[in-house]
Structures are given as C-alpha cells and as structure tokens.
Image: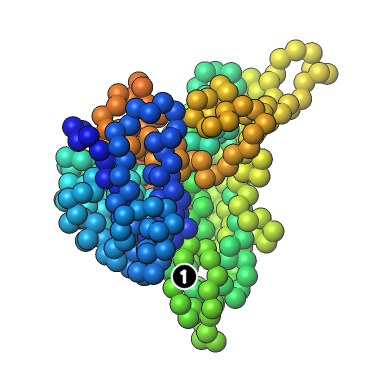
Amino acid sequence: MSKSSIGVAVIGAGMAGKAHAAAYRNAPALYESILPEVRLVSIADAYEPLAKAAAARFGYSRHDSSWQAIADNPDIDVVSVVVANHLHREIVEGLLAAGKHVLCEKPLSDTIESARAMADAANKASTLARVGLTFRRAPGIAYIHQLITEGVLGDVLHFSSRYWTDYAADAGIGISWRFKGPQGSGALADVGSHVSYLAEFFGGPVAEVSGGRFSTVIAQRPKPLGAVSGHGNTAVSDELDTVENDDYATFNLGFESGAAGTVEVSRVAAGHPNDLNLEVFGSKGAARWTQERPSEIQLYLSEGPAEQRGYRTVGLGNPHPYIAGGLPIDVSGVGFGQNEGFLFQARAFLEEVAGIPESESLPRNASFDEGLHNMLILDAVAQSAAAGGVTVKVGA
C-alpha cells in the first residue's frame, strides 16, 4: 500500500464493535512505530445514537448510520464488519467492490452458501479480506501452540474444551438476532466457533465430528422495547417471542492425525460469564489454559523422576508470544485479558494492509477460506445433531 496513512472505519457499534474501534485506536502504540499514520474516520451503526456515542468515545472523526456511507467514503481504506451474522455477506461484498480492505468478525456468515460466496469474492478482490479469530492471539494459547509446533508436547493425542457463558441464562433477557435461525446458529455459532478453530490450532485439521447434540432450554423470551447491543440488557415488553436456536451444544472431534477431542459450549451456564477452558494432551506432556486466569498456563512435562512430575504454573510475560515489546509493561505477573486479543488482531491487519513483510509482522489474520472451513465444521456438527449424533465428515 503506497498511501502515507490508513483511514479506518468500523461497522457495528455494539460490544464487539467497540472492541474493534478501541483496538484500531491503540494498535499503533504496540511494538515499534512502523505503521503509517492511522486515521480514525467513522463508526457506523443502523441505530444512530449508538454510532454517535461510540465515535465520540473512541475518537473517530464522524459517525454514519449505513454501511453504504462507509463504502462510498474515499477517506476510508480499512473496515471492520461487526454486525449480525446474516448481514455480513451484503456488507462485505459491497465493501470489497468499493476497494476496501475488510476484517470480518467470526463466524463468517449465517449460511454455508453465503460463506462460500464471500470467500469467492475475497479471492477475486484486489484488496485484503480477513476474518478475526481473536483467541488465537491470546498469549497463553499462542504459547501452547508454539509448544506443540516445536514438539515439546510431542504428538497431540486428544483435546478437551468447554466454553461456558451465561449471557442468556436469565429468561428475562430480551430476544435478539442471536436467538433466531436454525439449530447450530445459537451457542454453537456464537462461542462454539471459537472452540472449533482453537481445536485445529492445537490438533491440526479436523476430519470428522460426531455426537452432536443441541438443547434449547429457554423456549421463549420477551420482546425488547429498545435496541439490543451485544449481550446487554434492555427494557422488555410482556410480549414473548420464540427462541429458534441452541442454548447448549456438545460434540466430539476426529482429527486427521488420529487424535480425538470433545467440545461443550453454553450460553446459559449460570455463574460462568466467560469461561473458556482448553486442555491438550500429547505424547510428551500436556498443557491447559483458562480465560479466568489468562496471564498463565498450566504445563506438565513427562520428564524427570515420576514421583516429581506434576502440573506447574507458568506466568506469561517477556518473551512469550505477543507480550515482549508489545504491551507497555511486558513482564510476568502483569495481567491482561481478552481485550488485548483485539489489539493484536488489529495491529496484524494494519501491518498487512501497510505492506509490511510477514517476516517482520505479527502472524497474519485468517483468510475467508479459513473462515469458510470453520463454518463447515459447525455445519457438520449441526448435521450430526439432526441425525442423532452420527459421524459426519467435515465438508461432506
């Protein structure tokens, strides 16, 4: 990219949209200052008061109420799309046609058909199209991935994960787009999409899934009286609407390597606001990470006398992934969490847009083809569940 500055916009001013907006604002301050000037141009949302408030909060020059205004603005080069899944395709295709670089939230879309069309459009575009797989940038998760790729843990034997959240545990939470759509578009698409790409981050390609099971435990929810942003509460009416998709999902994984895995996700796990747990077992040891203690990992190595073995806590700091030279205080014992993942993600995207060589950059964001693959895993889970838990080949 030859421009001396990069103009940025965010479409969607809800919870994750604000995370993207803040990340672009702070990304230039990470690491050495090698980026062109980053101009914070606009935040757009169909609910204009939300866009206006977010633009003022994060220092963007203006706000807009339509994605078309972002596409038509020549001052904008980079756009994050952070809206309801079913809106992704129209917006992304329009932005790519307008010559914008696009970073889309996961999952890529609401249907396989739309995801394929988006991947095809991305492959034909003259600009970059990437999907955010934010948890791959959690330093602890990235370090476990490093231990696996370097052979420290040996061959991966099996993987276990749960992602429990409770944003929908209260039956009085108003209905929104998150509760509409076919089985598999609820908890599985929302939080299970994270776990499925992390499973492959640790265990390699997933060949098949089995044991798919969905449960919708709160069948109806009240209609909101105002706009619903993210997982937030809003005033509701006495009128009820039907929940169409899954509150809970579970499934098994079969990796191409022969390794196996299990996944359990929920949006109604009371008392677990954001509880992601990952554990991987290898032929030479094991490691685990939890979102509740993101500044450390637990590591077990099969070495030394058996009576002295056991899990040990490894505090994350310099020189673990993403931390060294990036965070202002980059030493072990200084906490960090999920918000930093959006910072690293934005920084990586801006570096790629700026044309900084990959060897001098953070790991690139995932392609739309990878985003499509992630959705094919979720689709296989839905097929498995619909057929009583049978084994389904991914992409079949």
Q: x, y (%) of residue 112?
A: 32, 54
Tell me which residue sits at (48%, 36%) in the image. 137
Q: Splitting the image into 4 quarters, where does residue 332 fall?
A: top right
Identify which amino acid the numbered label 1 is placed on: Val
Tell me which residue sits at (50%, 25%) in the image. 325
Compared with 253, 235 (above or below) is below
Q: Is residue 11 left or right of residue 299?
A: left
Tell me which residue sits at (30%, 24%) in the image. 357
Residue occupied by mark 1? 228
Which residue in the rendered view is the most extreme toward the right?
A: 307
Q: x, y (%) of residue 267?
A: 58, 60
Q: Determine if residue 293 is in view.
A: yes
Graded by Cα atoms within 10 Å as few (under 14), some (14 to 19) or many (20 or more), the crowding at tag 1 reads some
Q: Quadrant of the N terminus?
A: top left
Q: Is residue 151 left or right of residue 76?
A: right
Q: x, y (%) of residue 279?
A: 62, 36
Compared with 301, 393 (above or below) is below
Q: Determine if residue 206 is in view.
A: no
- In the image shown, does 206 or 109 lie closer to the viewer? 109
